[in-house]
Amino acid sequence: MVKQSRDIHNLDESEKVLIVGYHGQQAKIKDFSRQFEVAGWSFYKASNMDIGTDEVNMADLFLKPALTCAILTPSGAKKYALMSILYKDERSKSIQPHFSILEKFYNDAVLKWAELDSFEKEHL
């Protein structure tokens, strides 16, 4: 599978969809296993894959879960690295309330209860 992911530009559209789907499912497995940092990177990687069609927006499918995983990742340098990449990605700014929470984590700002409640309601 590693070789196939390197040669994704040489595949036809149906094979690209399968590979992106595979990466998305692997990320979901990591997410369900509570390995949020690994899942966040996997979702981000899948969001950047180009399958050559305008029908499916990878950012919509995989960037929101990447932001969620970044928020849920335990504190540390790896969390900050993931947050930094997602914070600087222009596509992330349109995903609310996730981006506003990520922005406050990134800037060490205080979160409001209303923001946490809206995030919690979306995930329960």
Image (cartoon, grey):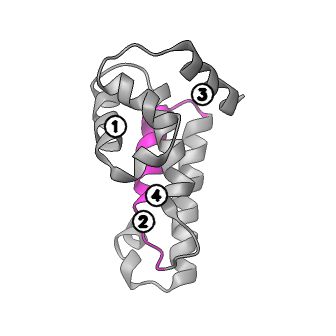
Query: Is 75 left, or right, of 122 in this rendering?
Result: left
Q: Are marks 1 and 3 in contact (CB under 8 Å)?
A: no
Q: Nearer the viewer, mark 1 or mark 3?
A: 3
User: Where is residue 46 shown, x and y percent of the image?
Assistant: 46, 58
Mark 2 or mark 3: whose residue is earlier in sequence? 2
Q: Nearer the viewer, residue 97 or 51?
A: 97
Mark 4 or mark 1: whose residue is earlier in sequence? 4
**Label 4: how many residues lie within 10 Å, few (<14), some (14-19) or many (20+)?**
many
Alpha-carbon distance for marks 1 and 3? 19 Å
Tag 3 residue: 119
The kind of residue tagged 3 is Phe
Alpha-carbon distance for marks 4 and 1? 14 Å
Q: Residue at x 37, y 23 (%)?
A: 105
Mark 2 or mark 1: whose residue is earlier in sequence? 2
Alpha-carbon distance for marks 3 and 4? 23 Å
Q: Which mark is residue 82?
A: 1
The kind of residue tagged 1 is Leu
Q: Nearer the viewer, mark 2 or mark 3?
A: 3
Q: Is residue 104 above or below residue 31?
A: above
Mark 3 or mark 4: whose residue is earlier in sequence? 4
Report if residue 89 lies within the magenta region.
Answer: no
Q: Which residues are magenta?
A: 33-52
Q: Which mark is residue 46?
A: 4
